[in-house]
Image (tube, rainbow, N blue to C red):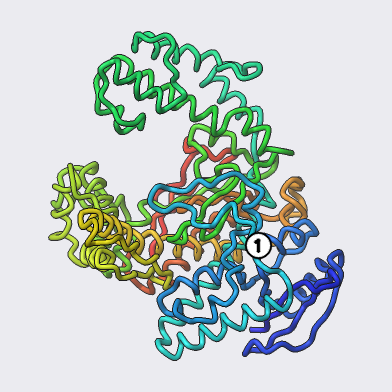
Amino acid sequence: MHSVLVGSDSSGSVVLVDLDGDGVPGRRDRVSTADLPEAIAARERTVRPRWVWSDTSVWYPQLLAAGVRVDRCHDLRLCHTILSRTAAVRHHAPLREDPRWEAPPASASAAEPGDGEALFDYTGPGGTAREVPHDLDSALAEHARHLTALREAEADDPARARSLRLLLAAESAGGLIAEELRGAGVPWDVDEHDRILTEALGPRPQFDAKPARMQAVAEEVLRALGDPRAELDSPVKLVKTLRRAGIAVSSTSQWELQQHEHPAIGPLLHYKKLARLLTANGWSWLAAWVHDGRYRPVYVPGGAVTGRWASTGGGALQIPRQLRPALRADPGWKLVSADVAQLEPRVLAAMAGDRAMAQAAAGADLYSGIVATGAVSSRDEAKTAVLGAMYGGTTGASGVLVPRLRGAFPAAMGLVDRAAALGERGDVVSTWLGRTSPELPEPDAEADPERARRVSREHGRFTRNFVVQGTAAEWALAWLAFLRTRLAALPEDVEAPPATASGPVFARRAHPVFFLHDEVIVHAPASQAEAAAEAVRASAVEAGRLLFGNAPVDFPLDLRISERADKGAEKESPREGEVSV
């Protein structure tokens, strides 16, 4: 495919460099920053090249603002991160020549700390002053390093190299999608958001006072604790107060509090829920993140080491279900919402080629299917067992139930058990397409053997889940990429009221507006809602076939077309909502 590299020069202009199939530079065109959108639009209309640039979050927003959409790109920063950590090429010395390519995305620098998960936190070195280089010479040199590394990988293992190229293409598409999501924004009903907050917390207070309903719950907690001066918003001080009240806790986590019986526990859990809503998505959040009827989060593709996305602004990965009614389509438009049931266990069945687990998931709830095999006696037990198998649960109910799965689903359990064993002994593991896990930290086994064993076990738990969660992230990336392409092929609806706040690229066409690991929401003109829903279905099928061929695994979609994105919206029939691959 024809590629064009984009980089800046010392004069402040932008240079477009044509690259041949081997990456050899050819024709160079110099344009001003102001003329860049039209120059790129002209190439898109004629040759539709693959754009090679330093960081999509730097180059793409200005194009979208000017009404220019590009079809594909090679994001040097995102691809460097994969290549420098991937087993197939991680020892390729030239990739380490310029450490600036390890910098975080430019879009993350102006946002707040990320929404990482305990086991798979955002890995970008936030707070560093280092920045990815955007100059032409650095971009050309880095692109040449990528091509050399890929050629060497292909010489060693052609099949593995093909998967790696696919991963790089998917990750780069994710970079484009993240900026399109931010540019278009999520249609947001400010009045509905305010209503939900008022109903849950009480009317918006002045200054820093607690809302009335929240204050009433706080007073209930204080009475139950017998301490009117207790500070409920300080975890350290609250732990001391709880202990004085006879509640032996080491933290204020929901899980630990629920282990105790005391009159203060119920209202305290309620208070913590209200406090979380106020702090994370209250009126201050609304003022900071919602403008002109749009919520514009900052996504970070590949922000977790597994390849899952992170968010460094607005908390897109932690919007509570309680606020979903505030996601409201523009007049004359609809929201097409879809999420995949039990994505990670289904991915595990496909990776392992476990026909028994695939059969348990066929056309139905996977956990209920596991119950039907006789391995466990209830859906709750099935869920506990599967999550324990993927996350390394060895105590409590997981410790009892996980062994039962080994007899019922030996291939699937064998895959995660092998990944855990490799991690415990210090080896790396890879996802289906080749993203590689970090290496095991090396504590001094002689100085502290118990700590060394603990670190080894924890790393085994990490690698056990890494292969599944990372491959599920790859499936979701492929789903998004195919959906992006299918929606772009739909014609503009010139009869629908324009969604002006979505920007010039998406004002008259269906487009994704929200993504959360296994869920996507599309904003579509009402006349195109059914076509957009079909695009969502077809893209899920295509993603499954791309990764797993004809593996007999179902990926059911819970798919809804509605004005609002809350789960209460009317669902399609199970037959229409299911996608099999």
Towards the viewer: 326 or 315: 315
Towards the viewer: 454 or 192: 454
The image quarter containing residue 436 is bottom left
Position of 380 relative to 402 (above/below): above
Q: Residue at x 14, y 55 (%)?
A: 403
- Tell whether 477 sits left or right of 443: right
Q: Secondary structure at mark 1?
A: loop
Q: Position of residue 34 (x, y in %)?
A: 86, 64
Please indicate, yes or no, whether residue 412 appears anywhere in the rendered image: no
Please indicate, yes or no, whether residue 478 appears anywhere in the rendered image: yes
- Tell whether 323 sits left or right of 451: right
Question: As drawn, which residue projects farthest toward the front?
Answer: 447
Mark 1 Cα-neighbour bin, 10 Å: few <14, some 14–19, many ≥20: some
Q: Residue at x 25, y 17 (%)?
A: 246
Q: Position of residue 517 (x, y in %)?
A: 47, 53
Q: Position of residue 373 (x, y in %)?
A: 16, 54
Position of 124 relative to 155 (above/below): above
Amino acid at dot 1: Glu
Position of 240 relative to 359 (above/below): above
- Tell whether 215 sits left or right of 182: left
Quarter of the rendering occupied by the N terminus: bottom right
Q: Which residue does the numbered mark 1 point to in the structure image?
A: 131
The image quarter containing residue 505 is bottom right
Query: How many discs mark residues in the rendered view?
Result: 1
Towards the viewer: 433 or 263: 263
Position of 371 relative to 47 (above/below): above
- Tell whether 168 sits left or right of 349: right
Q: Position of residue 55 (x, y in %)?
A: 65, 65
Q: Residue at x 68, y 50 (%)?
A: 184
Quarter of the rendering occupied by the C terminus: bottom left
